[in-house]
Amino acid sequence: MTDRRFDVIAIGNAIVDVIADASDDFIAAQSMPKGAMRLIDEAEAKRLYDAMGPAREESGGSAANTVAGLASLGLRTAFIGQLGKDQLGEIFTHDIRSLGVAFDTPPMDGIGATARCLILVTPDAQRTMNTFLGAAQMLGSDAVDEALIADSKILYLEGYLWDPEAPRLAMRKAIAAARSAGTKVAFTLSDSFVVDRHRDDLNALFDAKAVNILFANEAEAMALTGAADFDSAIAAIASRVPTAVITRGEHGAVAVRGDERAAVPAEPIERLVDTTGAGDLFAAGFLSGQALGLGLEASLRLGAIAAAEAIQHYGARPETDLKALASAILGE
Amino acid sequence: MTDRRFDVIAIGNAIVDVIADASDDFIAAQSMPKGAMRLIDEAEAKRLYDAMGPAREESGGSAANTVAGLASLGLRTAFIGQLGKDQLGEIFTHDIRSLGVAFDTPPMDGIGATARCLILVTPDAQRTMNTFLGAAQMLGSDAVDEALIADSKILYLEGYLWDPEAPRLAMRKAIAAARSAGTKVAFTLSDSFVVDRHRDDLNALFDAKAVNILFANEAEAMALTGAADFDSAIAAIASRVPTAVITRGEHGAVAVRGDERAAVPAEPIERLVDTTGAGDLFAAGFLSGQALGLGLEASLRLGAIAAAEAIQHYGARPETDLKALASAILGE
């Protein structure tokens, strides 16, 4: 597969993050599920924006953050996501292209504004996310270029985008294209509430062997399996997908592939600033290892290194050269 | 004057900063004057944006940063500046209002997009700024509410906005309103290139005693006076304005008022990250002292504390509570 043009092509929400500090009292007063993501409509987005403090904007989106991490690790990547024809869309396009990511989904007029995620960072560095999907949920099957997917080693899909119907159909088309072309399919569950809403549908997808690599954190693993404890949840997931990767925050991560099991601790950090993007960058590290033909443990270690970088600054995109940080494993 | 509604009302560019890391080689290849601000048109803004790396967006603008600092110090502030009717304008409005600043200049359609400043931060933490003024340069005299100026202790004017004609006329109207109402006028020279372009005009303004407090850094002081050395420049400026404040970066700052002279060293910092906003926040600290009736030295110290906060993080707006940082001087 080494002659393929891209290591990873991802489909996800094309989102601009709006990041502000907030107190625990503010989160409680707004009745938000702390540490989780909720979808909000335009009116609620406006109301919340008026209520929150001064913010900074950075391009985000879960799978888009992952391809940004992959690009920083030196991998060849492409991204598919829907933008509105507006200033935030221009910002998103600039940021992802300036990283060397191939991104050519045309922005569309009249389908709503570019998506934004109002991210409130509490003093414990946790992020609580409020997403107005806008144009992103209008991603249609037309945007899925089957030739590009066939020219990639791995197709990476963002679970958040399983919620709205049009992108879900687009991702099903992408999965079919990947299977025909021998492109591996990786999927992240994204959020335990997403799992709650689509549990049967997702399990059917896994049982159909449509997904080669599944990413979940502990809450998502428990939500998917309904298992009574974490070890049972891992076993249940590992029986459903060829490669299961479970992230455990400060407790590191575990990967299971058939009889093979690997685990790594979290990478040491100097200062926890903002956990936004930790899971996205973990996925970037792991997928880079897989695309480069490394084993489970080396791939997990790459994930831990990339996640550690992400949580030591505000925002989800890497701010340092991940390839240099990971040189001991990448061997360059 | 204690019954006035605002401590400080400022007129300045309503700008969103677009902040990216850049190498010295990039700055040299683009033939930019490193450490300075240059004005660019929309085509050049687009070309440069395409060439530069991934960025984060924060509301900025020199005088707007100063009122943000004043608000963080607990002072009552208002701002006048022109926005386009677009997403960046909504971001600017949100950010400044969420700090408690009164901002009611209506955004206008059909006059160009909201201004943005492409800020390139080199590894030495210096910022090189490329400003597309867009809507900001369309600030007209209609936007200057004379009653608001009469209801403020200090009117603060941004030298950058002396370049385009419409805002220059608007600021002249504001100065006249301030003089009638006994509102003190503070002016920052902003940039040595601005001084080069308007030296005679500015000196005429100072000789007419239209400005009570003048802010300059060393380069601007030398450009304004044409003096052979720094001490001569201070003497020349102090002879022209009632209160002269000269900032000297890591060497601290000096203020001269008639026979009175005060100097402070720079506040110690842990880590220099980005000098964007250092001068703006220094002005905030000094003006807060003046509005509160403190002396020159206490006002300079407030300036040094506010500037030190600004240079230890990316972006020009305060990220910590300046009132708490300055409690030893503010006495609360």
Image (cartoon, coloured by chain):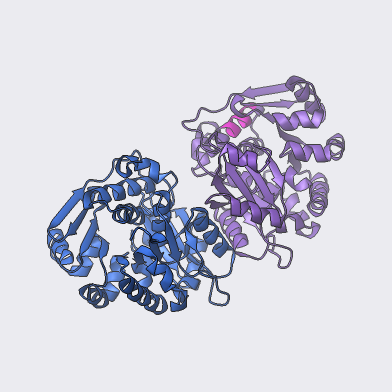
Chain colours: A blue, B purple
Residue A255 x %, y %? 20, 56
Q: Classify residue B88 as left or right of residue A105.
A: right
Q: Classify residue A43 as left or right of residue B218.
A: left
Residue B269 x %, y %? 49, 30
Q: In which quarter of the image is the N terminus of chain A?
A: bottom left
Q: Classify residue B146 as left or right of residue A189.
A: right
Residue at image x 26%, y 46%?
A266
Q: Is residue A227 magenta?
A: no
Report the magenta stretch's main SS. helix
Which range is magenta?
A: B297-304
**In which image quadrant can residue B125 be found?**
top right
State whether residue A314 is above or below residue A28.
above
State whether residue B5 is above or below residue A17.
above
Residue A103 x %, y %? 49, 63
Q: Which of A266 and B226 is in front in this view?
A: A266
**Residue with the most extreme front position:** A3
Residue at image x 38%, y 52%?
A122
